[in-house]
Image (cartoon, rainbow, N blue to C red):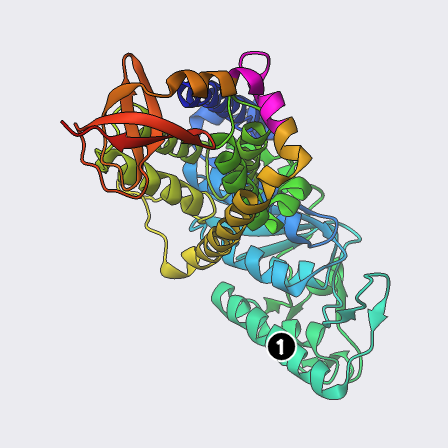
Amino acid sequence: MRYAAAVRICFVLFAALASFVGEAFTAPVVTNTTNSALALAPAATTGKKVFVLPIRDDIMPPLVYLVRRGVKAAMEAKADLLILDMETNGGRVDTTREIIAILGEFKGETATYVNKDAFSAGAFIAVATKKIYMAPESVIGAAAPIMVSPGGDGVEKMTDTSEKKMTSAVKAMVRTVAEKNGHNIAVIEAMIDKTKGLTVEGTNIVKEGDILTLTNTEAEKEYGNPPKRLLSSGTVKDIDELIKILGYAGAQRVDVKPTGMEQLGTWINTISPILLIIGMVGIYIEMKTPGFGIAGIVGIAAFLIYFVGGFVAGLSGAEWVVVFIVGVVLVAVELFVYPGTIILGISGAALMIAALIMAMVDLYPSPGVLPALPTIDKFQLPMTNLAIALLGGAVGVWLASLLLPKTPMYRAIISTSASGVRTEVALEAQKKSHLGQIGVSVSPLRPGGKAQFGEEILDVMSQGDLIASGVKVRIIGASGAEAVVEEVRQ
């Protein structure tokens, strides 16, 4: 009965927490505004949508979550144009690579608006869009890779070999997207590699030994015959004007807004294996102690935080919380309602594992009817995290079963879990009252299982004998929370 009560409370908590996720974390990350031209041309007359995604501050992991959610929102809305509103001094190359890959998922028209600065990684991300426009007095470039000191408070000098290797790798990454979007590769390489220099049509833009940085007027200057702009497609005063220039006057404008949860999501996903271990060990301890208390709450909270991390990262929605809850329900039904059916428990466990994996798989909206299937590489990180968690959880459960009953904490947990409903003394009295009772096994005892005594179904275990379901058994003692039984022979 204590397990059934615990499960009921778990379901209520899971339902409440799932509702919280659904309401609090599915709040829109976009705000609808309208182009200034709407006074003459209402948005409804065009049917087109423009998403504006901010690329601000340093290019660090939290920005990946904002970009991912923004791109997915644009894809779900079937947006026609995605504009990056950029003002950044640069950041990490690995984060830049992730952002470039995410932008590649959007199949509509893309453009970057350099609002002020697009240094270093900002320049790399800019060339990942098909067009670049710049604000008056803005600059782009200075993209040579550097190595930040371990403390993050300075620049660490690289050896010539390390610098060449890093520069080569960055050039290859940026050259790929520059070629794809039709940007001048020589310009991009001169921003990265100080040994390149840049001369266009006999005009020396930057000499060897210097890194290229362009103002808005320099970037839009035309060279060659036929004339072609160096990098920027033009200087515009603001994004509203850019939208009109690109032919989307009267379109619905949607500005993606940071939620403030991106940094929290970074921390959560860093410790996701630890959260899974805490969840597993917490639920195990809860199942081994009376009532419902601290261990169960901690375990449930750990699983919830894990799912919240996936949602904040833009990887998954609240649907995987629901799948996980369904799995928990099926396992509970297997244990407490229809013991021995096996199929319910296996199905529930499969759903729980699937939810834990898919909560961290990066899925993008599909343009077709059928959902897009993730590639194998998308499963690598969640599968690794789950493997670490299963190993760590097994060790944690073993240590808890071995050491916890010998500590004062165990007595405190039992007392707290009882919550005034079942004290330890009352439990001992109940165990004694069960001695000698005769019932029927409702599941095979191998040696653990379940048996019914009157209206009560108890967790029982034999003394090592295998007892089939439907056999009369007698309670002869207790081992922890389980009753020890023997077969009643006629």
The answer to which of 42 and 369 lies nearer the viewer is 369
Give the residue at x 77% y 57%. 89
The answer to which of 437 and 123 lies nearer the viewer is 437
Instruction: Tell me the quarter of the image containing the N terminus.
Output: top left
As helix, strand or loop, the secondary structure at mark 1 comes to helix
The answer to which of 353 and 447 lies nearer the viewer is 447
The answer to which of 439 and 53 lies nearer the viewer is 439
Give the residue at x 54% y 29%. 296
What residue is pinned by disc 1?
186
**Residue 416 belongs to magenta span:** yes
| Quarter of image, res 144 | bottom right
Q: Position of residue 269 (x, y in %)?
A: 59, 47
Counting labels gives: 1
Q: Is residue 192 above or below residue 349?
A: below
Give the residue at x 40% y 34%. 324
Instruction: Tell me the quarter of the image containing the C terminus.
Output: top left
Q: Magenta stretch: dominant SS? A: helix
From the viewer's perspective, tell me whether residue 19 is left or right of residue 472. Answer: right
Q: Position of residue 322 (x, y in %)?
A: 40, 29
**Residue 307 belongs to magenta span:** no
Instruction: Say what amino acid the circle numbered 1 marks.
Output: Ala
Residue 400 visible, this orientation: yes
Q: Local crowd at mark 1 within 10 Å, few (<14), some, or many (≥20)?
A: some
Q: Position of residue 360 (x, y in %)?
A: 47, 47
Residue 127 visible, this orientation: no
Q: Position of residue 123 (x, y in %)?
A: 67, 62
Start and end of the magenta stretch? 413-426
Q: Is residue 344 above or below residue 357?
A: above
* Residue placed furthest toward the bottom: 161
From the viewer's perspective, tell me whether residue 166 is left or right of residue 387. Answer: right
